[in-house]
Image (cartoon, grey):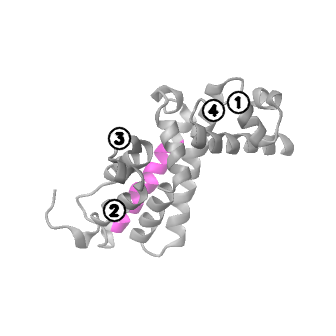
Amino acid sequence: MRADARRNLDKIVEAAAETVAERGVDAPMEAIAKRAGVGIGTLYRRFPDRHALIAAVGDHYIHTMANALDEAARSRADAWSAIWDFVSWVAEPGRAALATALAVLPEEAIAERAEFARARQGWVERFDGLVRRAQAEGSMRTDVGVEDLIHLLNVFTCHPGQLPEPVASHPGRYLRLMLDGMKATAATVQC
C-alpha cells in the first residue's frame, strides 16, 4: 500500500472511531469522511459499507487497547501499578464511549472476524500475564482473575447505561474503587 493511501486509511479509521464514540455506530458516513478530511468516494473505496468500516474500528479499538496494556506494563516497575494505569486509561470518557458504541453491535459484526479474534486473544493473554505477575508480587488478590477484570471493564465501559446514575456519570471512579478491592491487602475473605 502506498504511503498516502495508508495515511488516508489511518485517518478514516481514527475519524470513524472518534465519530462513533460521539454519535454511535449509525453516525453518518459523510460526517466520518469530513472529519477524516477525505471525500466520501475515498471513504467508500476503502470501506464499501458501514459494516466494513465498523469492523475496522473494532480492530483499531482492540489494537489500541493492546498497545496501551503493553505501554502500561513497560512503563511501570510493578504489575499492580500497570494494571491500575491500564484500567484508568480504558475508563477515560472517549474510550468508554467508543466501547459503549461498539457493544451494541451484534457479536458477529466484530468478534467473529479472525483478525479481531487473534488480537483479542493476544490482549487477553498479556493481561492475564500481568494479573499473574501482580499476584506473584503479592499486590493482587489470588482469588481474582483476568476474567473478573474484563467483566468489570465490560460493565463500566460498555454498558454504563445499565448502571445507577451516580455510577454511570463517573464510571472511572467506581471502576477504580472496585479495583482497590482487588488489592491483596483488601482481601478479608477468599471468594
**For the residues marked 4 and 3, what is the alpha-carbon distance in whole angstroms?**
22 Å
Pointer 2 or 3: first along the chain: 3
Mark 2 or mark 3: which is in front? 3
- Residue 162 has which mark? 3
- Foreground of the two, 153 or 74: 153
Position of residue 117 in the picture relative to residue 150 (left or right): right
Disc 1 is placed on an element classified as: helix
| Residue, disc 2 | 179
Q: Which residues are magenta?
A: 119-134
Position of residue 136 in the picture relative to residue 77 (left or right): left
Marks 1 & 3, CB-CB < 8 Å contact: no
Pointer 4 or 2: first along the chain: 4
Q: Amino acid at mark 2?
A: Leu
**For the residues marked 2 and 1, what is the alpha-carbon distance in whole angstroms?**
38 Å
> Which quadrant is the N terminus positioned in?
top right
- Residue 29 has which mark? 1
Residue that lies at the very extreme toward the top in this rendered image: 49
